[in-house]
Structures are given as structure tokens and as C-alpha cells.
Amino acid sequence: MFDFDKQLSALAQQTVLCIGDLMLDDFVYGEVSRISPEAPAPVLAVKRNELMIGGAGNVARNLNSLGVRCIFVAVIGDDDAGKYLASALKSEGRIEPHLAVEGGRPTTRKVRFVSEHYSTHLLRADWEVAAPVSEKTENTLIEHVYAAMPKVGAVVLSDYAKGALTPRVVRAVIEAANKANKPVVVDPKGRDYSLYRGATLFTPNRQELADATHKAAMTDAEVAEAASGLRKTLEAKAVLVTRSEAGMTLVADGAPVHVPAYPVRVKDVSGAGDTVVAVLAAMLALDADFESAMRAANAAAAVVVGKRGTATASIDELRSQILPAATLAPEQKILFDWLQLDERLAEWRRASLRIGFTNGVFDLLHPGHVKVLTGARATCDRLIVGLNSDASVKRLKGPERPVQNVNARAEVLAALEAVDLIVVFEEDTPEKLIARVRPKVLVKGGDYKRDDVVGHEIVEAQGGEVILIDLMPGHSTTDMVKRARNAR
């Protein structure tokens, strides 16, 4: 299987070509408190609106968010919406936009009116001309595709049926990609997919699959049968069916693979399909197998549906969803560099989070440690654990300690959900570290008295508090080490 922990960091070296229908997403948020006296319609008291790059542009945004470079080819009109999109795309660090401007054609714009309190879409208004682009525009798009093909590792066709992906453009893209041996991921539209024949991977949702194959697609078996038939008809290597809360189904070589959706509180499904194809293309550019690509896309979809608006998933969010906490520990939770600590603290303080601190050697983690750590986490929004370095432990505990080196001790701590950050310190006490963190709550075990807790003056002087948590009798690392040596 694909090694996610090792390979995800290589996404930054990948480039994907995305071509499709670009649009402007406008989300208008407000509250509904009454019905209009003029008609039986809710009145939305508008509070704010957000403009976002949508359609195929959201695929490009998701690639950018993952650290992947995207060469983006699309069409805009000569209007304010088009100018906004051109400017917004240029501001995205890893997107290289190539936009064909077609006069007399409006840039596709979707305005969604959303009840912010209930996270409910009340109405959507579209400005668009869903007709094929001109031959001149086709030529421009194809020229950009041919120029980009040698530079990319995978291709995405993001079809919203607005006219950019004409039959001529689609065939040119697929034929050029096949000639260059580059995988093509298709997010299809319509009921006749023959236009895309020869592409590598198709991503219809369950209803689109049923419409395209004229077959039932409700149960696992029905979805697999319909997808298998579609794969054969289109001469594709794989078909991945997105099934909302039922997860995803992959049909490729071998038996069908069904993966459940991640449990998540859904806030907005807008653009989730864009995230899926972006991740699939990025993973295929890394030479991942289809199943690994699907599992990554499934994880990314869980991230974005938990956000409002046309959202993206970052590489850190993707890693956190796919990999267990213990695997992520060295990269996300353990700090030796205090400058990185300052960055993390600034981020948490901007979010008005209550920061807690405790410290210790944690040589052999036992239930007593866990009780203190979980109790400490209950007092704050983010818990930082100061961890004595190996040299510090030797000075405090003697030359035969620690039993485990600092990396091992840190990784075990980082696997605990209660711990948000581990910071290693070299001194015998954490006083300098506490002064650096400036926590709102300082926690120690109940074997301490308040006045004996190192750093209590620093914390209390800034309006913080010291909390002592009762210990669990019968648990001591020193005693555990003695018993182990006596047993030997």
C-alpha cells in the first residue's frame, strides 16, 4: 500500500493541469426572522457575503492548498466577475492561470443565499450562458493544454457543462495526455460519457452513475455493477463513485472496494466534488494506486464538508484525517525549536484559546501521568507539556535515567489526545519555558503545594491560576524502575 506518512510530503514537488468551467461563487449570509408581506417568501437580513473561486477554479484552489502546483486553463467573460477571478487566481501562490477571455459571454456566477444560523441554503441565483465556447476560444484552450502537458504529472477535466469543455477540447486533452502517459481524472457531466472515452479515472456521484448507465445504483452491489459496466464502456482504468454519507466505491482491477464516509458534522457540501478530484489527481501524480488515492480523497472530503462555503483541505488537515495521532506526533506535536513554539502560541492566541501548561520527565508513562494530563487538558483549550531533556533528567534523577530517551518519551506523550504540544527544555526547571508560554493555567500533581510549583508567580502575575490535580496512588516511575531492576 501507498505510504502516506512518507509520501504526502512529496506533494509539493507535483504539478497538475486542470481545465474546465471556471465560475465565481458568491455566498450571501444572513438571518431569517420574518416572511415577506409581498409574497410567501422568507426575508434574509444580510450580514455579509464572501466571494470565492468556484467550479474548476475550486479544483485549482484545492491543489494549491495541498501544496501542489496547478496549471489552470479556463474561460472568463470580459466583465467584473471575470476580472475578479483573474486577480484572485494570480494571488494564489501555486496556481498558474491561463484564462481565455471571450467577449459577449458572461463569466459564470452563482449566488447562494444562506441562513447563517441554520447553515441552510435558501436560494441560488445563477448568471451564465451554458453554451459551447467559440472555435477561437477552443484553439486558445488547446494551445495552453499542449504547452502545459510536458510539465505536469496528472490532468483534471472539471466539467460543469458551461461550455468550456467542448467535444473538441476534451478529445484534444485526453489524446495528448494518453500520448504523454499522464493520468486523466474526469469529473463528468451529462448522461453521455462517451465524450470522455479513454480517460483514466471517472468520478460520478451515485445519481450521475445511475443516469449515465440507466441502472439502479443504490446498494453496494448495484453501484459496483453499474460502475464496472461504465468502466468497460469508456475504456477507463477505474471508476470512483462518490456516495455522500455512504462513502465511496472504487471499481478498478480486482474486487470493488467500498470505504465508509468519515463521521463528520456536515456544514456545507459545496465544492466537495472539486476537492475529491483534486486529491485524486495529486495522488496519481505521485504514482499512488487507485485505492490509496480514493482513501486520501475520502479523507479530504470529510475535511471540507465540515466547513462553510466552497472550502479547501490543507496538507496538514489531510494528514490529520488519514494518519493516527502517534504517526503525526514527531511532525505536529513535538517541538525542540522555541521559535516554532512562538508561532503556535500566536496562532492560538489569535483564536482566543485558553492555554494550559504542565511539565515533567514522563520517563515511563503510567495511569497516574494520564490522570494528570487529562485533568490538565480539561482546564484549557490547548495543553502544552514541558518535557525535560535527557541531560536535564540525568541531573535530576541520576546517571541511569532516563530509561527512555527524549524522542521516545515525546512520541508516547504525543499519542495522547489530551496533549496538544510537547516542548523540550534543557534547564532543570521549566521556569524559562513558562515565561515564554505565559499560560492561563499551570497544572501540577497534588503532591505539590501551590507555593512550590515552579512558575506560579509568573502565571498569577498575569491573571492566570495554578491548579493541583490529585494523584493516583500506587503509581510512580521511580518505583517501576526499582521493581524492574529487582526483578532482573
Image (cartoon, grey):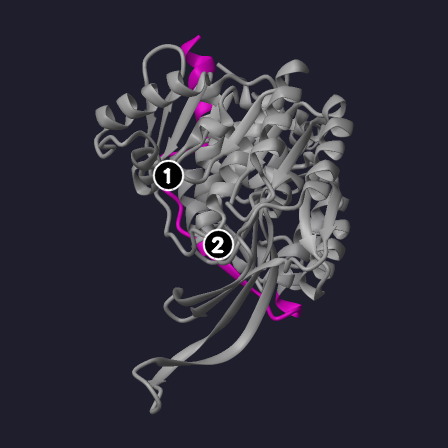
**Position in image of residue 66 (x %, y %):** 63, 38
In the image, what residue occupies the spot 40% across and 16% down? 252
Give me the C-alpha separation between circle 2 and circle 1: 14 Å
Query: Which residue is nearer to you in this view: 355 or 204?
Result: 204
Helix, strand or loop under label 1 = loop
Which residue occupies the extreme front position in the image? 135
Question: Does residue 386 appear in this view?
Answer: no
Which residue occupies the extreme bottom position in the image? 37
Inspect the image, locate mark 1, and give the three-letter code of the amino acid beneath it. Answer: Tyr
Query: Which residue is nearer to you in this view: 262 or 290?
Result: 290
Per the rendered image, the range of residues in magenta is 460-488
The residue where tag 2 is placed is 307
Inspect the image, locate mark 2, and give the three-letter code of the amino acid beneath it. Answer: Lys
- Classify 10 Å Cα crowding around label 1: few (below 14), some (14-19), many (20 and above): some
Question: Which corner quadrant of the image does residue 316 belong to?
Answer: top right
Helix, strand or loop under label 2 = loop
Relative side of 193 to 247, left or right: right
Picture disc at residue 262: 1
In the image, what residue occupies the spot 69% across and 40% down? 72
Which residue occupies the extreme top position in the image? 488
**Position in image of residue 461 (x %, y %):** 66, 69
In the image, what residue occupies the spot 62% across and 28% down? 155
Relative side of 182 to 417, left or right: right
- Classify 10 Å Cα crowding around label 2: few (below 14), some (14-19), many (20 and above): some
